[in-house]
Each structure stands twice: as structure tokens, then as C-alpha cells.
Image: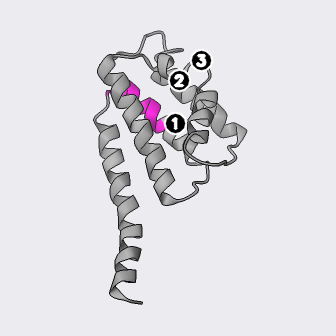
Amino acid sequence: MSDTQKGGLLAKVIGPKRRWRQYKARVRQLPPDHRAAVEAIERYLMHFVPVDAESDASRFEGLADLFERAAADGTPIREIVGEDPVTFAEAFARNHTDGGYVPARERRRLTDALTHAAGEGTGKAAKTA
């Protein structure tokens, strides 16, 4: 293997990892309710098989972009994801990759997590930035 090939391989391994760490750092900066929503959607999206590392990284970066803008604008979570978070997450995934199967258990888990993040079912409304 030539040095050029080794460099390309190294970039393929380290590049996505670096992007993942940058994405996670961005998510940690979100307000707690938006962070909880992103983490729930992220967990759900992990069930979608990426076409490649580039599309997988861009999918999560797009998710961070969306919620950063929403937090900055003070947009409530339900205005972002709507009443059916599964429909939102699957449409979001379709825009960033080709396919994947998500078990019903994970669909329920996403719905419950976003209901909690939005402050519903707890008797108090979630705070925005």
C-alpha cells in the first residue's frame, strides 16, 4: 500500500470520527429540551443504514443545524417535529439516505422521548432558549 493510499484510508477512518465528535459537541451546546429531542432522534436514526460515512455524517450535521436554528429562534420542539416524531424522523432520514428498517419498539421509544422533551405528559411545558 502506497503512502497516498494509506493517507486516503486514514482520512476515511479519522474524518468521520472527527465529524462525529464535532456533531456531538454541537449537540451538547443545545438547551436541555432541544438536546433531549436531538438525542432521541439520533438514537432512532441509528437504525437507518447509511449509504456511506459521508451521508451518515451529513445526516447528523443536518440534524444539529436544524435544532441549533430552532433553539436560536426559540422554536418549540413540536413545531420542529410535529405531532408524529416517527414521521418526522423517517422523512428526515429519507432526505439523507436510502432506507433502513426501524423496529416498532424504537418508534414508540422516539415518540415517548419527544413527548417528554416537549414537556408533554409531565404537567409542565418545556422551556425554549
Q: Is residue 52 above or below residue 44?
A: below
Nearest the eye: 55 or 101: 55
For marks 2 and 1, give the one nearer the viewer. 2
Q: Amino acid at mark 1?
A: Ile
Q: Which residue is mark 2?
A: 81
Give the residue furthest to the bottom: 1
- What span is in magenta? 31-39
Q: Residues within 10 Å of mark 2 (few under 14, many from 20)?
A: some
How crowded is the residue under tag 3: few (<14 C-alpha within 10 Å), some, or many (20+)? some
At horizontal 36% and vertical 62% (from top left) the residue drawn is: 15
> In the image, is 97 to the left or to the right of 13?
right
Which quadrant of the structure image shows residue 26?
A: top left
Three-letter amino acid code of the residue under disc 2: Val
Closer to us: 24 or 14: 14
Q: Against 51, is 64 above or below?
A: above
Magenta span dominant secondary structure: helix
Disc 3 marks a residue whose amino acid type is Glu
As for residue 72 lying within the magenta part, the answer is: no
What residue appears at the point 68 percent right and 38 percent down from the top-left corner? 105
Dot 2 falls on a residue whose secondary structure is helix
Q: Can you tell which mark lies on residue 41? A: 1
From the viewer's perspective, tell me whether residue 52 is left or right of residue 30.
Answer: right
Residue 115 spot, x, y in % from top left: 54, 21
> How far is mark 2 from mark 1, CA to CA?
10 Å
* Whether label 2 touches label 1, CB < 8 Å: yes
Q: Which residue is mark 3?
A: 83
The quadrant in which the C terminus is found is top left
Of the two numbered discs 3 and 1 on the same chain, state the one appearing first in sequence.
1
x and y percentages locating residue 111 in the rendered image: 60, 27
Residue 119 picture location, percent across and down: 46, 16
Q: CA separation, marks 2 and 3?
A: 7 Å
